[in-house]
Amino acid sequence: MRSTRSQSLSTSERLYRSREYIAKSPGLANGGIALTVIEPELVGWDHIEELLSEYGFIGFGAANKVQIINTLRRRFGDDIELPVWDAFIGDQSDVYPVCNSIIAHPRKVQWRLFSTLNPNARIIEKVSAVNERVGVAPLPDWYMRGDGPPSLTSWVEDEAGEIVA
């Protein structure tokens, strides 16, 4: 959700400076590129409105899309910007068999998944470049290094060792 008020600090800088406060605040999360409200009722709608004014935009974690959009429109009006990304959620009983099938019957071409809590500058640069190329907002370097909340940087390499996702 976006406010029209401009800010002098970048959102990334503001999140970095506020990382301890955010970590101690029930219902909030540091998303690196957006302050995220995970539990609106814990934060309180008056405080959410203050945060929106301060940051210029905020995100909401996985929530019932219809319910949260209706609540936001009642609170802030129909003309607010509400971009939405759908999350795919599945029960363990549905997801694990599919994952196990893929592992048990791999395709000929093997892409490999890598993850680290401490990415080096080369990995950060390459992951950020792929994100930009496919239209995903790259996370700040400090976030990927775990200098804010703990962060797991993950990427997929093709058979030639190039980062593809």
Image: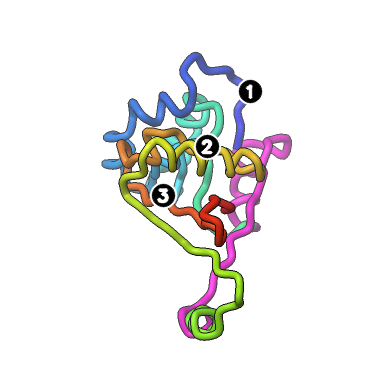
Q: Which mark is residue 4?
A: 1
For residue 66, side relative to residue 114 (left or right): right
Q: Upstream in the sequence, badge 1 or badge 3?
A: 1
Work out whether 24 lies above or below 57: below
Work out whether 100 lies above or below 79: below
Query: Residue at horizontal 36%, vertical 44%?
Result: 119
Separation of residues labelled 2 and 1 (CA atoms):
12 Å
Q: Nearer the viewer, residue 118 or 137?
A: 118
Closer to us: mark 2 or mark 3?
3
Q: Which mark is residue 153?
A: 3
Q: Upstream in the sequence, badge 2 or badge 1?
A: 1
Residue 73 position in % (x across, y down)? 65, 43
Q: Nearer the viewer, residue 4 or 42?
A: 4
Magenta region, residue range: 66-95
Query: Residue at horizontal 51%, vertical 57%?
Result: 156
Q: Nearer the viewer, residue 132 or 48?
A: 132
Image-quadrant location for residue 22: top left
Determine crowd level at label 1: few under 14, some 14-19, many 20+ residues with C-alpha closer than 10 A. few
Query: Residue at horizontal 48%, vertical 53%?
Result: 155
The type of residue carrying mark 3 is Thr
Q: Which mark is residue 131?
A: none
Q: Secondary structure at mark 2?
A: loop
Q: Which residue is mark 2?
A: 58
C-beta proximity under 8 Å, tags 2 and 3: no
Q: Upstream in the sequence, badge 2 or badge 3?
A: 2
Check if residue 48 falls in the magenta segment. no
Q: Secondary structure at mark 3?
A: strand
